[in-house]
Image (tube, coloured by chain):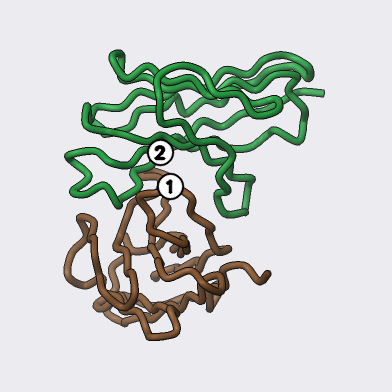
Amino acid sequence: KAGVTQTPRYLIKTRGQQVTLSCSPISGHRSVSWYQQTPGQGLQFLFEYFSETQRNKGNFPGRFSGRQFSNSRSEMNVSTLELGDSALYLCASSLQGSGTGELFFGEGSRLTVL
Amino acid sequence: QKEVEQNSGPLSVPEGAIASLNCTYSDRGSQSFFWYRQYSGKSPELIMFIYSNGDKEDGRFTAQLNKASQYVSLLIRDSQPSDSATYLCAYSGGVSSGSARQLTFGSGTQLTVLP
């Protein structure tokens, strides 16, 4: 069974640009959650999508957005990048939702903002 | 105050010893608790969950939960060098998390098992 796939794995952007990250969950999983991981803040919840609907959102500015497609694949977008957005962005899929705790994480997309 | 507090470590134990990892949380409404392990350069993976007060054992791992004290711990018996990783405590179902569906993580404790 294929795991969670995130693309791209690494990317470098400059301030002010925007970026789109992609996540393909485990087959059959309808929930996709996104987390930002930094050395100082740890894992911070961004948002969760379930069956194409955003059903929970963390405390991030509106520059962070996402969506989910009918095949459960999800994208997140960060506009007007800032230096502080440099982080590892992790996607996690779940069969019934992130609150059940059983999340399967992808390898992450490491974003560097210069 | 952070919602989930963990000693960042590093925590070092000799091979074969018991490693004790601790976590306190502030949200009294928290219902479910989880321990994730994250190897350096890798993504987190779930190793234990516990919902009820008391102990839960799974192989060399024991999770302990005390909701009155808002405390959850993970014991690793017969620690092996392969257990060296960062251990993340997480909870769901809290009031402050917004809904039962959000998983809130601590910053993690870095464990090193010395051969």
Label 1 chain ID: A
Label 2 chain ID: B
Q: Which residue is mark 1?
A: A101
Q: Residues within 10 Å of mark 2 (few under 14, many from 20)?
A: many
Establish if A41 lies above or below B71: below
Indicate the secondary structure of the residue bearing disc 2: strand
Residue B22 horizontal/vertical position (percent): 46, 21
Classify residue B75 as left or right of residue A87.
right
Viewer-proximal residue, B60 or B112? B60
Label 2 is placed on what type of residue? Ala
Establish if A50 lies above or below B71: below
Q: Residues within 10 Å of mark 1 (few under 14, many from 20)?
A: many
The chain whose colour is brown is A
Label 1 is placed on what type of residue? Gly
The chain whose colour is green is B
Q: Quadrant of residue B62?
A: top right
Classify residue A64 as left or right of residue A114.
left
